[in-house]
Amino acid sequence: MRRLLLALLLGAPLLATAHAVGLPSELLADPAQEQRARAIGRELRCLVCQNQSIEDSEADLARDLRRIVRERVAAGENDAQVIDYVHARYGDFVLLRPPLNAATLLLWGMPVLALGGGLLAILLLRRRGAPPPPPPLSAEEQARLAALEEQAPR
């Protein structure tokens, strides 16, 4: 029983990725073309899932995009032509590595801006220094504190 459970746990990730590719009838007959199609699919974002490539996604749109990629690879197009075709239809968002242009400048610059903002916040907090110590207690406050300490249960 333990071996079966262990096999299921270790094999589950493999089953998930194998299932994402789809039906065997969707695969290309030529293994070299299928490998090219998978490599191209890993460069394209699923427009439904947004954080997965079309090769990893089980969404219907990802399946349609995989079919388009495989049709174009089978038709003899090179990798750049296939990616350009999908890019022309769906825009920069379909690329997992969008090009650097005016529209994507903020996207590419955001990690640098976030890091710079964090460093600036740290420097500003260090510059402020520690807050000043509280003023000493007055004689009346010290007497009240002593009375409270005497009343406190031990």
Image (cartoon, rainbow, N blue to C red):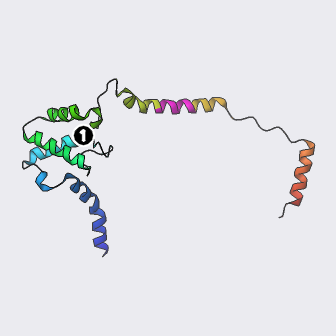
Q: Between 47 and 104, which is closer to the camera in this rendering?
A: 47
Q: Is residue 142 left or right of residue 34?
A: right
Specify the segment rendered in magenta: 114-121
Amino acid type, mark 1: Leu
**Quarter of the image where the C terminus is located:** bottom right
- Residue at position x 87%, y 51% in the image: 145
Q: Is residue 5 magenta?
A: no
In this view, 120 is above or below 65: above
Q: Quadrant of residue 108?
A: top left
Question: How many numbered markers are drawn?
Answer: 1
Q: Is residue 116 magenta?
A: yes
Q: Position of residue 12 (x, y in %)?
A: 28, 61
**Quarter of the image where the N terminus is located:** bottom left
Q: Report the predominant secondary structure element of the magenta stretch.
A: helix
- Residue at position x 32%, y 46% in the image: 49
Q: Position of residue 13 (x, y in %)?
A: 28, 58
User: Residue reaching furthest top?
Assistant: 102
Q: Position of residue 77 (x, y in %)?
A: 10, 35
Q: Quadrant of residue 92?
A: top left
Q: Quadrant of residue 88?
A: top left
Mark 1: secondary structure? loop
Q: Is residue 92 left or right of residue 77?
A: right
- Residue at position x 18%, y 45% in the image: 66
Q: Between 99 and 146, which is closer to the camera in this rendering?
A: 99
- Residue at position x 90%, y 50% in the image: 144
Q: Is residue 76 left or right of residue 99?
A: left
**Where is mark 1, residue-wise?**
44
In this view, 120 is above or below 10: above
Density class for disc 1 (Cα within 10 Å; few <14, some 14-19, many ≥20) is many
Q: Position of residue 6 (x, y in %)?
A: 30, 68
